[in-house]
Amino acid sequence: MGDITEAIVAWIGDTAKQRGATNEVTAETRLLDDQVLSSVELLNLTFFIEEKFDAKLDPAEFVPENFETPNAVVAMVERSLAT
């Protein structure tokens, strides 16, 4: 697992545990289908990403497909860092 993936999975796992979740978060966890994060937590995830990785996320990227799994989030971050 890469540094970006590890950081994002850890953040999501910690956030979910704060709400009482007991399931382990992996890079393939279905974030939306399994309601791992609330809409506010998804927004906080974008703030975390922008601060942690000095990334500027394009609001056009804020579509459900980019938040389906941590791997999808990582792909979005990597696209933003490539530009």
Image (cartoon, helix red, strand yellow):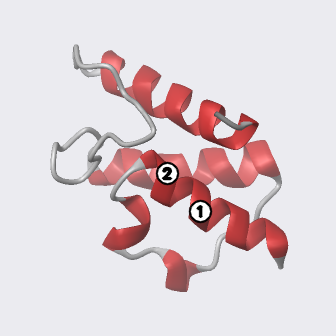
As helix, strand or loop, the secondary structure at mark 2 comes to: helix
- Could you tell me residue 50's position as x and y percent? 71, 55
| Horizontal and vertical percent position of residue 10 | 54, 26
Q: Is residue 13 above or below residue 39?
A: above
Crowding near the residue tagged with mark 1, few <14, some 14–19, many ≥20 C-alpha atoms within 10 Å? some
The quadrant in which residue 58 appears is: bottom right
Q: CA distance from mark 1 to mark 2?
A: 6 Å
Residue 38 shown left or right of residue 63 in the figure: left
Please give the name of the residue rendered at 47% of the width and 59% of the height, measured from the top-left corner. Answer: 72
> Percent from the top left, x then y, of residue 52?
75, 42
Quarter of the picture holding the N terminus: top right
Determine the secondary structure under disc 1: helix
Nearer the observer, 83 or 19: 83
Disc 1 designates what residue?
75
* Tag 2 residue: 71
Compared with residue 67, is residue 82 higher up or lower down, i.e. above or below? below
Quadrant of the image for the C terminus?
Answer: bottom right
What residue is drawn where x is 26% and y is 47%?
30
What residue is drawn where x is 32% and y is 20%? 24
| CB atoms of marks 1 and 2 within 8 Å | yes
- Amino acid type of the residue tagged 2 in the rendering: Asn
Q: Position of residue 34 (x, y in %)?
A: 16, 43
